Image: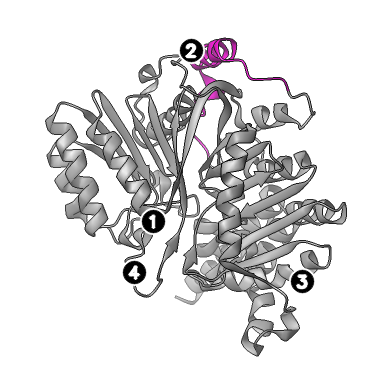
Amino acid sequence: MTSFFVLFLIATEALAIYLALRAVAWSRTPQGAVAWVVFLLSAPYIAIISYLFLGHSRIKGYVVARREYQEILTGVETARKAFPPKEDVENRGFIAFEKIASSPILSGNSMDLLIDGEETFDAIFEAIDAARSYVLIQSYIVRDDQIGRALKTHLIAAVNRGVSVCFLYDSVGCSRLPNSYVQDLRDLGIRIYDTNALRGPTKRFQLNFRNHRKTVVVDGKTGFTGGLNIGDEYLGRDANVGPWRDTHCRLHGPVVLQLQLAFCEDWHWATQEYLYNKIDWPSAPAEDNHDALLLSTGPADEMETGNLFFNACIAAARDRVWIASPYFVPDPDITTALKLAALKGLDVRILVPANKDHWLTWLAAFAYFDELRDAGVQFWLYDTGFMHQKVVLIDDSIAAVGTLNLDSRSCRLNFEETAMFFEPSVAEDFEIMLEDDFARATMLRKKITEQPYWIRFTAPLARLFAPLL
């Protein structure tokens, strides 16, 4: 028994050293590498288990069809020729967005802003009810509550009309979703799968990679994405949270096929089945002729596309950078870019919620506020309920709405998506919406030393967990 125990200790220490070396070689930041090395060597019995679940920064085996399949590459190139965008005459770096997305900016699109839950779910249900061929739907969170059951009713009605339905959900976000909800849909002919658990044992250590995308595509012609999951709280029905402020969008035109392509890639990862034959390039143009791009990001990308998106947006700004995000735990390069933009005299505003739904992430933000405020960045605290939208407005030329939060998890670890429009008229709509949000918010003026004692002392500690927040 004694010799077995000694061998166990030696094996554990050896594994901890191996994982520490692996963390040094593969961690995306020096700070993350140092944190894992210290944790693994000082507390190996706890750290080894933590590392197996949380220590991975890349996901293997995920097929990005935009890079891998000649048929998709040919279709993308065909769409580029059929729907060429206007030239980037002001040299805003639009080509960088195309390279980040591995997809072109396309003309022939339209977008409707959907503000808050009632408008969003009404539009989604209306589109599902009008479906003739297929519905693709994906959500990070699905609840078996009033709005979740309403979605089920509309999907079942679509299936009864002969419409094909493919449904993806995330096992982490849907940890409270009862199996009966899934089984009811499956029994009625809806193909519904968990993006994280279908590969069984081979994916048991990928808990850290979450699919945070919210997608609806109907017949390849109408698409939706934005901040709203499927749950009553997104309609402000949770008394503990109060009114819920969020933004979604309805898309038409070839950008919908870019959204559909992202869904097909996730579907292939979950099921090993190809849905790419449902993408018929090129699509018909929408009534408006807006230039747009659907940018999908995630840990399968060759570069850190989430961080690059925010940095490219900030670099493109000449007058203003307005960002709304429920969480603010940025990487150092984004922090530097925001400070430089403010120091140049740009109007840099970050809208965050005054209230909280995740304590640790909310606390960590206070450890960032002062250094950016000293450079001239304004922080506005939305205090009329909870603010959950993910919106970026750059000058009067770039407007984006999607699922991408301004935190390390969204930028590094989650699968995300955001719809970008390069049109002054769309930017004007975003400006009107955000000005109304700022009117419902209060500018942060207190330094962290003026905050309550518990925030002063816990915020710096929470910031230590930034790579996982």
Q: Position of residue 319 (x, y in %)?
A: 78, 46
Horizontally, residue 450 falls left or right of residue 214, namely right
Amino acid type shown at disc 3: Asp
Q: Mark 2 points at which residue?
A: 71
Residue sitting at 46 percent across and 69 percent down? 385
Q: Which of 98 and 433 is in front in this view?
A: 433
Q: Position of residue 318 (x, y in %)?
A: 80, 42
Camera-nearest label, 1 or 4: 4
Residue sitting at 54 percent across and 17 percent down? 76
Q: Are marks 1 and 3 in contact (CB under 8 Å)?
A: no
Tell me which numbered mark, 3 or 2, is placed earlier along the sequence: 2
Vertical relation: 150 (above or below) 49: above
Horizontally, residue 156 falls left or right of residue 294, namely left
Q: Are marks 2 and 1 in contact (CB under 8 Å)?
A: no
Q: Neighbour class for label 2 at 10 Å: few (<14), some, many (≥20)?
A: few
Vertical relation: 438 (above or below) 71: below
Tell me which numbered mark, 4 or 2, is placed earlier along the sequence: 2
Camera-nearest label, 4 or 2: 4
Q: Is the magenta stretch mostly helix, strand or loop?
A: helix
Q: Nearer the viewer, residue 113 or 301?
A: 113
Work out whether residue 329 can be spotted: no
* Quarter where residue 469 is shown: bottom right
Q: Mark 1 points at which residue?
A: 173
Between the residue at mark 3 and the residue at mark 2, the CA separation in whole angstroms equals 50 Å
Res. 238 mark: 4
Q: Which of 18 and 181 is in front in this view?
A: 181
Work out whether residue 306 can be spotted: yes
Amino acid type shown at disc 2: Glu
Q: Where is residue 25 in the image (x, y as percent from the top left)?
A: 70, 48
Between the residue at mark 2 and the residue at mark 1, the CA separation in whole angstroms equals 33 Å
